[in-house]
Image: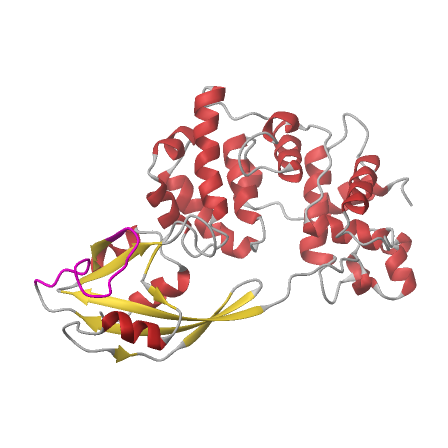
Amino acid sequence: MTAGFAGRVVAWQRRHGRHALPWQRTRDPYRVWLSEIMLQQTQVSTVLAYYERFLQRFDTGAALAAAPLDEVLALWAGLGYYSRARHLHRCAQVVVAEHGGVFPTRAEVLATLPGIGRSTAAAIAAFCAGERAAILDGNVKRVLGRAFAVADDLSVARHERALWARAESLLPPEGEDMPAYTQGLMDLGATVCTRSAPRCEACPLADTCLARAEGRPEAYPVKTRRLRRSAQGVVLLWLVQAGRVWLVRRPATGIWAGLWSLPEFDTPEALAEALAGWPGQADWLPGFTHVLTHRDLHLEPVRWALPPGADAQALPGARWPEGRWVDAASLPDHGLPAPVARLLAGPA
């Protein structure tokens, strides 16, 4: 099974893999790094537009490093997993400060930078320098887990380490086409060996795949320690005054960390208590649900129009974190959570 594995993947990628993605037309490590970070837990179709917009604004790592974090978050808004954007910004700053603005291409060095793990470092090194380094993202775990019917629970650290060792043992010989092999594993996981309904008939590993031979490819990879879904209710205060909206900075950790958003309350009763004595009245808007990876947010927006001259910070019950008034026309310039951005895009 191991013999010929890499050759099959490379041959398949050259004939059937993806070749027209914009980051495949460059060996610039900055651009490849940007694509790899964006593609973490995000579909290619979603990343394409974000990738182009980022490069239009930040064409080099130095430009990204010099930008305010708020501008980076604003461009990232809607892509999700916002810690990636903060790490992206910090990583660019470290490259400028410690590497003279020249992005490294060795996996060992890349893995020391903020937000770049072992697999991402290996992918960048393979694509940009042809380095013989193994990747093991979610798609590749699925391909290898099925190809070799790995029955060990990958939630256990030692079992994941064993899969890393297997991934390294499968690397093509020195001097072979590492970019095609690396891209081939990614493409197989994304387009053929999918989480559900894998297209085994189109897979170059089909005749030796142990999971297919068992007739149950969906049983692999094994990972029993899964996060449970939860639900949370949130009341959003949409405070408006003379064409402006009051935004507050979210905490540095947790959901939408560091973004600008609307003030939140746990319950309608908590909102009513905080707004007691305020001028104006509440306009309860239809609630809606925003689905995160492991949590459903049930959002209840309440619009409140303050009369001119009222100070949001001085109102009874106002206990905001960092906040500011923002003109409605300038809202897209702020990093807003996707559901809040959609809400505010309506008439204010």
Residue at figure coordinates x 31%, y 72% from the top left: 271
Q: Is residue 234 left or right of residue 107?
A: left
Residue 148 higher or lower than 277, as above or below: above
Report whether 88 appears left or right of 204: left
In front of the other: 204 or 149: 149
Residue 55 percent across, percent down from the top left: 42, 40
Residue 247 in the figure: left or right of residue 210? left
Q: Is residue 44 visible?
A: yes
Instruction: Tell which of 94 and 102 is nearer to you.
Output: 94
**Residue 341 within the magenta-colored segment of the rendering:** no
Residue 249 placement (x, y as % from top left): 33, 52
Residue 240 x %, y %: 20, 66
State the quadrant of the C terminus: bottom left
Residue found 46% across the figure and 44% down from its top: 85
Residue placed farthest to the left in the image?
Answer: 309
Magenta residues (range):
309-323
The N terminus - image quarter = top right
For the stretch drawn in magenta, the main secondary structure is loop
Q: Is residue 222 above or below residue 50?
A: below
Relative depth, front residue between 33 and 85? 85
Q: Identify the image quadrant of residue 281.
A: bottom left
Q: Is residue 227 above or below residue 52?
A: below
